[in-house]
Image (tube, grey):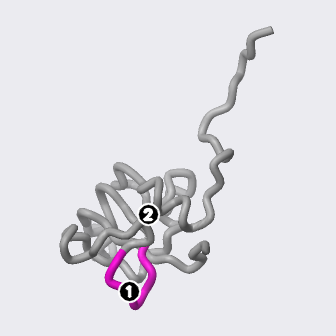
Amino acid sequence: MTVRSAAVAAGGQWRDPDDGIRYPSGEVHAWERGRNETVCGLSLSRSRLARFPHVSWADVQPASGRHAEEVAEVCRRCAAGTGARRDDRGWTRTNPRP
């Protein structure tokens, strides 16, 4: 079962100096609103993860770059639970061997 409308839970936060809104930093996890655990199964309170209901999961992906400025790592298990495919690689071979 994949999660389509996930918010973000993260280990840290930073504030935008222009508008004062807090955004996630550090390691980010997908989180469904109304639940006390991430998509990968981590408890929010025991893991000391902060919730960001105003930030969608798509906005913290390094490819999008919208709120991903301070994101250090994206949880692979949460990415798989939200529908990321295994064959979507972040690299391409430019000079294949014959």
What is the secondary structure assignment of the residue under circle 2? loop
* Mark before the other along the chain sequence, 2 or 1: 1
Q: Which range of residues does the magenta coloring cover?
A: 31-37
The answer to which of 37 and 97 lies nearer the viewer is 37
If the image is split into quadrants, where does the C terminus sit? top right
Residue at 42% x, 66% y: name it. Answer: 40
Q: Residues within 10 Å of mark 2 (few under 14, many from 20)?
A: some
Q: Classify residue 43 by image quadrant.
A: bottom left
If the image is split into quadrants, where does the N terminus sit? bottom right
Q: Nearer the viewer, mark 2 or mark 1?
A: 1
> Which secondary structure is most common in the magenta stretch?
loop
Q: Residue furthest bottom?
A: 34
What is the secondary structure assignment of the residue under circle 1? loop
Looking at the rendered structure, the kind of residue marked 1 is Arg
Q: Mark on residue 67?
A: 2
Q: Position of residue 82 (x, y in %)?
A: 56, 67
Up-down: is 62 above or below 51? above
Residue at 72% x, 16% y: name it. Answer: 95
Residue at 57% x, 75% y: name it. Answer: 3
Based on the picture, tell me whether residue 36 belongs to the magenta stretch.
Answer: yes
Answer with left or right where residue 61 lies relative to residue 91. left
The answer to which of 59 and 79 lies nearer the viewer is 79
Residue at 43% x, 63% y: name it. Answer: 67
State yes or no: discs 2 and 1 in contact (Cβ < 8 Å).
no
Q: Position of residue 18 (x, y in %)?
A: 32, 70
Using the numbered discs, state the Cα–Cα distance from disc 2 to disc 1 in whole angstroms.
Answer: 23 Å
Q: Residues within 10 Å of mark 1 (few under 14, many from 20)?
A: few
- What residue would you read off at disc 1? 35
Looking at the rendered structure, the kind of residue marked 2 is His
Q: Position of residue 52 (x, y in %)?
A: 35, 77
